[in-house]
Image (tube, rainbow, N blue to C red):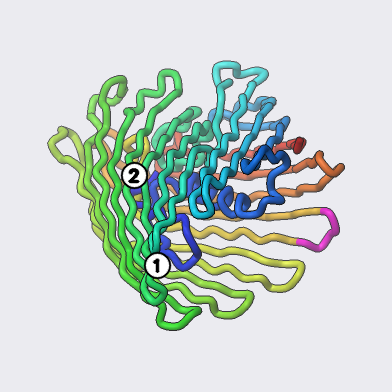
Amino acid sequence: MTAVGLLAAAQNVCGQEALRISMAGDVAAATQQQNGSSIGYYNVLLGSAAWRFSTGLGLVFNDNVRLQPDAESDLIIQPSLNAALHWPITLKNSLDVSLGAGYSAYLQHQDLSQFFINPGSGVSFDVYAGDFKINLHDRITITEDAYQNPGNGNNQNLVSLQNTVGTSALWDLNKVVVNLGYDHVNYASLSQNQGEPDAASENISANAGVRIRPELMTGLEAGGTLINYSQSGQASAVPTPDAVQWNAGVFGSAQISDYISARLDVGYTVYTPDTTATNLVTRDSSGFYLSASLSHRVNQHVNYTLSAGRSSDLSAYGQAQSYYFVRLEPNWNFFKNYSITTPFSWQQGTRIYNTTANSDVDYEQYMLGLNVSRSLTQKLSVTFSYQYIRQNSAQAGLNYTDNIVGLNFTYQF
């Protein structure tokens, strides 16, 4: 839920922006597209259209469902259904549709029960014309975990809908690659009595890269966002200000070896909220952004991705913030038939604007996880997951610890 996103869904030589509209949605969509490139990913073939169907059943124990200092626990049952379509309409044009949806049934806190739609769900249509690749897309997600939006100032269960519709164009001239993107994003709060404003944003982005060598690319990137908030239903007496954000910078990517690749984005960003609202305190929102990432296959047993940097992001619900982050995701393949990951993340942020009555909303969040997956049969698999979240804030009411334990069964038809 950030400021600017470059929506190139092409090769890894494309520019990867430092500021993103929805990182979870983009990553999930990219993963879906990568999986879809292999016909073996699908389990039903109808003419030229390939389908993939699966169903899941998750059992989740959460010891702090409301993310409050005084924790309340619950057991959650999560049935889900997933479907994906890859339809090569012509040799160069293809349609991809993906939907992962389900229901979270809380046994004790039934007011928190709700439907969800997984990131990456949506429609994507690729058109190739000469040196151009044009992508049209519409992505939708419904999430319920407030910890995914740290520093939001309200730890209550945050059920949010985000829909992104737009287009991107890739112009590949071999030595030079140009990307252009536009997205219209709608945000809506689905939580009862949440008091958060809905919003809509217009996002444009562009970058151009030059291949200095086959394994090395560098270039320029820029983007801008205009966001408008609906004040109806907002509990606060101070309206959430509309805002404009723009960024400009440089990027570079390198395939250092067969097993190591790296990426660096650095530049300057300015976030300008409307200051006509009374009792609004605006912090300095101009500064640098930085995103550095590394992907490394150590050996046949260990590989990892590491990213770190600083970003200034819009939020779906008026909590624009600047923050530093570190994310590490190692994969361990020491045991046959088992897939093990131990993700870790750290984020420290400050809200860009606030009211005088609630002037200090700095926060620091740690997340540590463990995921173990195993195939029980050719079609049935199981995943055990554990997640620890700790958030510290200058506001005592926003300090919490959360432990989430899950067991999920997935059946591929």
Element type at mark 1:
strand
- The residue nearer to you, when weighing 143 against 256, is 256
Cα gap from disc 1 to disc 2, whole angstroms: 21 Å
Q: How far across and down, in percent of the image, does residue 329 sit?
A: 62, 58
Dot 1 or dot 2: first in sequence order is: 1
Tell me the amino acid under the disc marked 2.
Answer: Asp
- The residue nearer to you, when weighing 88 against 237, is 88
For the point 60% across and 16% down, the residue is 110
For the point 39% across and 67% down, the residue is 172
Residue 396 is drawn in which quadrant?
A: top left
Identify the image quadrant of the C terminus.
Answer: top right
Q: Residue furthest left?
A: 276
**Prevalent SS, magenta region:** loop
For the point 59% across and 74% down, the residue is 260
Magenta span covers which residues?
A: 333-337
- Please tell me whether residue 168 is drawn above or below residue 257 in the rendered image: above
- The residue nearer to you, when weighing 378 against 97, is 97
Q: How far across and down, in percent of the image, does residue 20 sit?
A: 39, 51
The residue at which mark 1 appears reads as: 172
Q: Residue furthest bottom?
A: 213
Residue 50 is drawn in which quadrant?
A: top right
The residue at which mark 2 appears reads as: 183
